[in-house]
Image (spheres, rainbow, N blue to C red):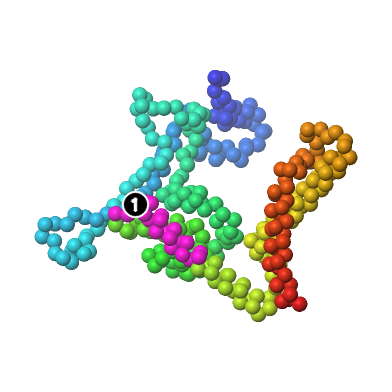
Amino acid sequence: MGRLNLSAIRHRSRALAALDSRPQMRTPSWMTALASIPISQPLLRQQPTAHPVPSTRTRTLPLPPEATPEMKLNPPTETVSTLLHHGRRHTPKSSRKRQGKRSRLFQPVKIEYEEDHIRQMFYKDHPWELARPRIVQEQSGDDAGRYGWDWSTGIEQPGKPLNGESVVHRTLYLLENEPDITLAHAYTKARREFYAIRHQEDVTRRIAVEEATHTGAVYPDYADPIVSGMRREDAAFAEWRSWAIRERELKVQGRSSGAPSPAVRRGATGDRPELDEDATRPQMDALDAVEAQKESTNAPARAGSR
């Protein structure tokens, strides 16, 4: 290691010596502030403290022997608050293991909250929820008090779109208020409410599209992902079928001309190997049957449109 650089600590003393040697020199404006707030002298850095994570749980108290039937139906509960330390904690040297680099020993500890684990778990199970558009800007910074959010009534709150944060807050409320409930049970209960509302939204959207179509609305093909995917699949299938027919014709022409053909030959397009006529004949017969069935199915629809 190199020598310690103490030039910042000695800066004021050097400036005072320069003023004594040159009286005509103007006193810097930072001299008074540096005299009242001197530079720190200790050269040892302190390790950052671990930030405690509060955890609140409700547990059921044991019933006394003389418990009444009312007490058995509604047993007494107790709210317990504990502190969970998720940061670095000092452990004995014998049981300590090297984790990471020593250069990170004095870096600030990450501040964590209990709902961070729930949020990470939800978006890991539902990654496509991150693709939904969201409004992250609040008008006053206190939408919960402005709209009167009460997570005891359910996962759906006034003025708040349904998203992953609703599941996080609902799960946290169940953990803090439901007696003797586990994280898995609370998370499952919140997700069940989330799925029910999502299903209701999908049904409402589908019915609205059907009603609009019935009254004359016309939607493009890309509006329905299923129809759009089927059209792309049909286009790829038609392209492959034309390529297979062309390869089979080239194979038949090569055999009829008597020209020796190599064991492996590239196709006419140069990007696919040729097909064996005997091996592809059952497939081509099946393709012809599929095309005939498709034509017979579409014939009544075309006749009705006329």
Percent of width and height locating residue 283: 70, 49
State the SS at label 1.
loop
> Of residues 273 and 280, which is closer to you in this image?
280
Residue 198 included in the magenta stretch of the image? yes
| Residue 266 visible, this orientation | yes
197 over 100 or under it: above or below: below
Residue 252 part of the magenta-drawn span: no
Q: Give neighbour class at mark 1: few <14, some 14-19, many 20+ (Cα, 10 Å).
A: few
Q: Residue at (82%, 42%) from the top-left corner?
A: 251
Residue drawn at 35 percent across, 50 percent down: 55
Which is nearer the eye, 6 or 241?
A: 241
277 relative to 172, above or below: above
Q: Work out whether 169 lies above or below 50.
A: below
Residue 70 is situated, as x and y percent measured from the top left of the image, at 18, 66
In the image: residue 28, left or right of residue 45: right
User: What's the residue at 71%, 52% (across, down)?
Assistant: 285
Q: In which quarter of the image is the C terminus?
A: bottom right
Give residue 43's position: percent from left, percent from top.
48, 28
From the top left corner, tell me how far across and down residue 261 is, in percent.
Answer: 83, 35
Of the pair 257 and 204, the residue shown nearer to us: 257
Predominant secondary structure in magenta? helix
Q: Is residue 226 above or below residue 263?
A: below
Q: In front: 69, or 214?
A: 214
Magenta stretch?
Answer: 180-199
Q: Residue furthest left?
A: 66
Report the residue marked by disc 1. 182
Q: Quadrant of residue 230?
A: bottom right
Determine the residue located farthest toward the bottom in the rendered image.
215
Numbered marks: total: 1
* Residue 40 visible in this rendered orientation of the protein: no
Q: Residue at x 48, y 49 (%)?
A: 120
